[in-house]
Amino acid sequence: MQGAAPARWTAALAVLAVLVPTAAGCGSRAAADGGPGVLSSSWGDPQNPLEPANTNEVQGGKVLDMVFRGLKRYDPRTGAAENMLAERIETKDSRDYAVTVKDGWTFSNGEKVTARSFVDAWNYGASLRNNQKCAYFFGYIDGYDKVHPESGKQTADTLSGLKVTGPRTFTVRLNQSFSGFPDTLGYAAFAPLPRAFFEDHAAWLKKPVGNGPYRVKSYVRGAQMSLRTWDAYPGPDKARNRGVDLKVYTDGNTAYTDLMSGNLDLSDDIPAAQLRNVKSDLEGRYVNVPAGILQTLAFPFYDGKWDRPGMEKVRTGLSMAIDREQITRTIFRGTRTPATDWTSPVLGAEGGYRAGLCGDACRYDPQRAKALVKEGGGLPGGKLRLTYNADTGSHKAWVEAVCHSINNALGDDRACLADPVGTFADYRNRISQKKLTGPFRAGWQMDYPLIQNFLQPLYYTGASSNDGKWSSEKFDDLVDRANAATDPKTSTGLFQQAEEVVRDQMAAIPLWYQNGSAGYSRRLSDVELNPFSVPVYDRIKVA
Amino acid sequence: MGQYVLRRLLQMIPVFLGATLLIFLMVNVMGDPVAGLCGDKACDAATAARLKAEFGLDRPVWQQYLTYMGNVFTGDFGTAFNGQEVTALMAASFPVTARLTLVAIVFEVVLGVTLGVLTGLRRGRPVDTGVLMLSLVVISVPTFVTGLLLQLLLGVQWHWITPSVSMAAPYDELIVPGFVLASVSLAYVTRLTRTSIAENRRADHVRTAVAKGLPRRRVIVRHLLRTSLIPVVTFIGSDIGALMGGAIVTERIFNIHGVGFQLYQGILRQNTQTVVGFVTVLVLVFLAANLLVDLLYAVLDPRIRYA
C-alpha cells in the first residue's frame, strides 16, 4: 500500500497540472465594452420569452422598445401617442377603424412591413393556444371571445374583427365603442411581426428580429444582450449611438458600484439605500422623473366586513391617517410624490391627470381620520392587517411606516399590523384566491398613457386587475359613456367623473406617484427616461 | 476497494431520492407559481389554466414528482418559465460556479495548509498568535462584509479589479470573489491543520522518522503533514458542496451568473423545475465529493484500508 501511494500523489498532481494552465489560458479578459459609441446598461433577466404580446415587465419591455416600432409611439417626454408606422387611423363611430400603414418600412431582415405583419401578430397574441400573457390587450377586438374564451377550447384561430383590405391597409372592428383605442396601439403587444417569427419560432426567440432602430447582435440568456444600431432603419428616430449592451445584474447594488467605477454606463435601478448619496456620488449625472406608476392600498371588498355601507368613512379615514409627505421624503428621498388623484402626472392635465382631485381625503389629518374611522363603525375586528410581498421592491420600509402613521393617528399602537408574504407569486395567489382580510399593496404601472388605463382595468366590475372586487354601477356606467364618447375632451371629463366615484367610495387609497430614476457615466449625455421609466436609448449620445 | 466504492454508490440512491423528494415538496408548498407570472395583474383564467397544464401543475403532486423523476433519468430537467431548458441553464451556470469553487479551494489548500503548518510548528510564537487572531477576525466577519469591502476598495477606490465579473467569468476575474468565498473556510482550514500538526508532532511515526535522521523537510511533508491532513481533507471535501450551493451571497455581490444566481431567481419565481434540477445536481456533487474524501483517507494514511 505504501509503495503505491507516491503514484497516487503524482496522479493528483497531474490533475492539478492540467487545471492550472487552463486557469492561465482563460486569463485574457472578455471585452467588457462593445467598442466606440456603444454604451452598457443594467438589465434584469426577462421573466417570459421575449415575444411582444408575452412581455409584461420593464426588463423585457426595454428590449422591445429598442427592437420594435408599432403603429403609434408614445413621445418620450409628453407621453402623447403619435403616429409611427401608421399613416392614418380613421373612424366614424369609435368602433370601426381603418388603418393605413406607412410605405417604406421594413424589418431588419429586409422583409416589408405590411398590414399582414400587424394582423398576423395580433392574431398570434390573442390566440389562447400561444399562452401570451398580454392577450387581454386584444380583448376589445371583435371575436376575442372565440379565440380566447374564458374557459374551454377556442373555436376560432383568428380575430373576426381584423381584416386585411390591401397590402398596407386593414380594418379593425371592436366589440364596443372605445374612442381611446388608437392611443393604445403604442403598446409593445401591438408590434408587427415578421414571417420569421412564425416560420422558425425557436430561432427568432434566440435572436429577435424587429423593425426598430436597433437589431440584436447576440443574446446570451440570463447574462447579456448586445444590440447594435441598424443603419438602414427607415424611421425618424434613428439611434444617436452605435449600440447598447444590456448586462444582467442580480443586485442593483452591484450595478451601482460598477457605475461608480466606470465599468457600466447606465443604471436605471438605483437601490433605495443609495438614494441619499446618489447626487454627490455621480456628480449630478442622475435623472429622476415621474413615471406612470401609482402605488395604492386596495381593499378586499369580497369580504363583507369591508363592503358594508358606512365603511367608506373608515377607508377615507385610513387614507387621511397616512402621512404621505413624510414617508416619501424620508424613505423614498423624493423618488415618490404624494398622490392626490388616481392617475399619474405623466398624463398631463389634458390627458386627465387632475392634481388635488382626491382633496381632503388624501390630506394628512390625524384628528379627522380618527373621527371618521369611529363614525364608520371602526376597523373590522378592531385591527388592520396590511399585506405586502417582501421579496421585491423594498416594500417593508414603507408598509411599516404607513402602519406606524395609522397607529399614531388612531392612538392605538396595535391597530395596524404589517403582514409580509414571502414571495410575489404566493402574494398573487392569496389575492386571486381572495384570502386577504385587510388592505393590501397594489401597484399599477400603466400600459399606455391614457386615463382609461388607470381606471377601467382596476375598478370596473369584473375587470382583469380589480383585485379587491370593487363594484359600482355608477362608475361602470360613466366608464362606458366615456369610452363611447368620440370627443377626447368629453371622454376625459367622464373618466374624471368616474374617478370621483372612486374617491367618494375610497375604492383604493392612493399613496404616491412613483418616479423612474437612473444614473449614468461621464461618457453619456442626453439621458432621459420615458413615462414607462425605461431609458430612451436611441437619444443617448456617447462621447 | 472496488466493492467498497460500489457499496457507497448504491447507498447514494436512497439519499438522492429522498433529497429530491424533499426539495420537490418544499417548492410545491410555496403555492401556485403561475400567479406570479403576470406582474401586478392577475393572469387571465384561460391563459393561467393553459400554463398550468403545460408545466403539469394541474396534476397531483405525487404524479408531478414521478413524471419529473422519470424525465430526469432521461436527462430532461424540464423547462423554466422563461422558456429555457433547465439543462441549458445548468450548462451556462455550473462551469462558472465550478471555476469559482476551484479558485476558492486552491486558496483554502495553498494558503490554509501553509499557514496551518507554519503555525502548527511554531505554537505559541508570535506568528502563531498573529495568524490565530487574524483567522478569528475572518471567521467573525460575515462574507458579504468582506465581499463589499474588497469590492469597494479594489474596484472603486484603487481600480485594481472591475467590481463585477464579466459574462465569461475567466479565472483572473474570479480571484477576488474566490478569495472572499474561501475566506471563512480558509480560516477553518488553517486552524484544523495547525491543531492536527501540533498533535501529530509527538506521534510515534514522526519521532521514528526524526530518529532515523531524515531531513526536517522530508519529515514534515511526508510523515507529519500527510497524516495531519485527514481532518482537513474531510472539511474541504464537504466544503465543495457548500461552496457551490452557498455561493449565492458572493455571486450576487460580484454579479457572477452561476448556480447561486439561478437558484435565487428560481426561488423568487417559484420555478420548481429550476430549483429542483439545480439542487439535485448539487446533491450529486455533494455525494461524489464525500466519496472522494473517503477514498483519499486511504491515500493519506496507510493504516486505513477499504475492503
Image (cartoon, coloured by chain):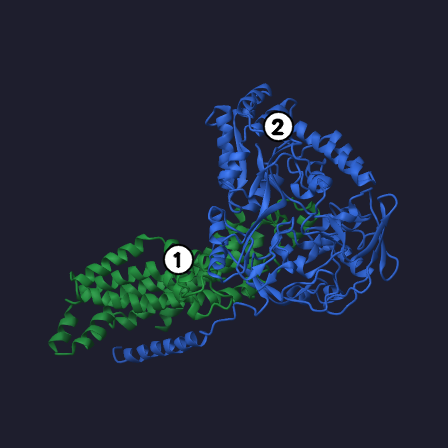
Chain colours: A blue, B green
Residue at (55% x, 34% y) in the render? A324
Label 1: how many residues lie within 10 Å, few (<14), some (14-19) or many (20+)?
A: many
Q: Nearer the viewer, residue B149 or B292?
A: B149
In-front residue for pair B157/A45: B157
- Image spot of residue A464 (x, y percent): 69, 42
Left or right of B36? Residue B291 is left
Which amino acid, mark 2? Ala
| A515 lies left or right of A81 | left
> Callout 2: residue from which chain?
A
- Residue labelled with disc 2: A361
Is residue A24 visible from the viewing direction of this image? yes
Q: Nearer the viewer, residue A162 or A171?
A: A171
Choose top left, top right, bottom left or bottom right for residue B148: bottom left
Whether pointer 1 and pointer 2 mark residues with C-beta atoms closer than 8 Å, the reply is no
Check disc 1 and report the residue beneath it: B147
Characterize the local packing of mark 2: few (<14), some (14-19) or many (20 or more) Cα atoms within 10 angstroms.
Answer: many
> Considering the numbered disc 2 on the image, is that residue within a helix, a strand or a loop?
helix
Give the image location of residue B116, x and y in percent: 24, 65
Q: Looking at the image, which residue is at 73% across and 40% down? A: A350
Q: Mark 1 to mark 2: distance in Å?
A: 48 Å
Specify the amino acid type for callout 1. Gly
Q: Is residue B9 visible?
A: no
Left or right: residue B31 compared with residue A209: left
Number of on-image labels: 2
Q: Quadrant of the N terminus of chain A?
A: bottom left
From the top left corner, tell me how far across and down residue B245 is, in percent.
Answer: 43, 59
Q: Give coordinates of residue A180: x percent, y percent.
A: 78, 44
B273 vs A384: above or below: below
Residue A25 image-quadrant placement: bottom left
- Secondary element under disc 1, as helix, strand or loop, is helix
Q: Quadrant of the C terminus of chain A?
A: bottom right
- Above or below A486: residue B58: below
